[in-house]
Image: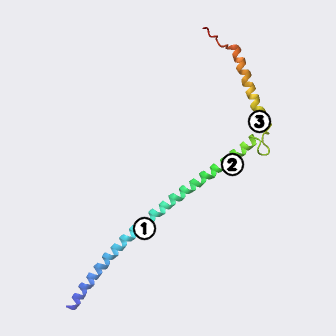
Amino acid sequence: MSSSRDARVEDTYELQNDQRLDELHSKLRTLRGVTTDIYDDVERQNSALDDARNAFSSFGSSLAQSSRRAGQAFGITPGGVKQWRTIGYCAAALIGLWILWHVAGWFWPSSPTTP
């Protein structure tokens, strides 16, 4: 009698162990899924940070190049157009526009207003 009772107790313990093992397996699957999701999220964030770093690096290079060109155009940096030459170009452009305005007045005179 005692051996059948011991067998039932062992079966009960075995069933409890199997249930606990299934619960543990389920928790491990959940934990593995969460870990995979965290890994994927970290990879996406790293990719976004790399893209942002590349964009800022490209912007910095473009800004430095534009600054260098502006410095050369205004004669601030060596090898650029001298300041007096830039002023001369602006003055020549204004005189040219003034002459063009007067020449255009010869071909299209303004009509006199009659009272």
* Residue at the disc numbered 2: 64
Judged from the image, the secondary structure of the residue bearing numbered disc 1 is: helix
Tag in front: 3 or 2:
3
Up the image or down, 100 lies above or below 36; here it is above
Q: At label 2, which amino acid type do we have? A: Ala
Q: Residue at x 37, y 70 (%)?
A: 27
User: Is 59 in front, or is 113?
Assistant: 113
Quadrant in which the C terminus is drawn: top right
Q: How many marks?
A: 3
* Residue at the disc numbered 3: 86
Instruction: Spot the residue most to the left.
Output: 1
Q: In the rendering, at what x and y percent does residue 5 appear?
A: 22, 88
Nearest to N terminus: mark 1 or mark 3: 1
Q: In the rendering, at what x and y percent does residue 52 appear?
A: 57, 53
Rendered image: mark on residue 32: 1
Tell me the crowding category of disc 3: few under 14, some 14 to 19, or many 20 or more residues within 10 angstroms, Cα based.
Answer: some
Q: At label 1, which amino acid type do we have? A: Arg
The quadrant holding residue 97 is top right
Mark 3–mark 2 Cα distance, whole angstroms, equals 22 Å
Tell me the crowding category of disc 2: few under 14, some 14 to 19, or many 20 or more residues within 10 angstroms, Cα based.
Answer: few
Nearest to N terminus: mark 3 or mark 2: 2
Tag in front: 2 or 1:
2
Judged from the image, the secondary structure of the residue bearing numbered disc 2 is: helix
The quadrant holding residue 23 is bottom left
Mark 1–mark 3 Cα distance, whole angstroms, equals 68 Å
Q: Residue at x 75, y 40 (%)?
A: 74
Up the image or down, 83 lies above or below 45; here it is above
Quadrant in which the N terminus is drawn: bottom left
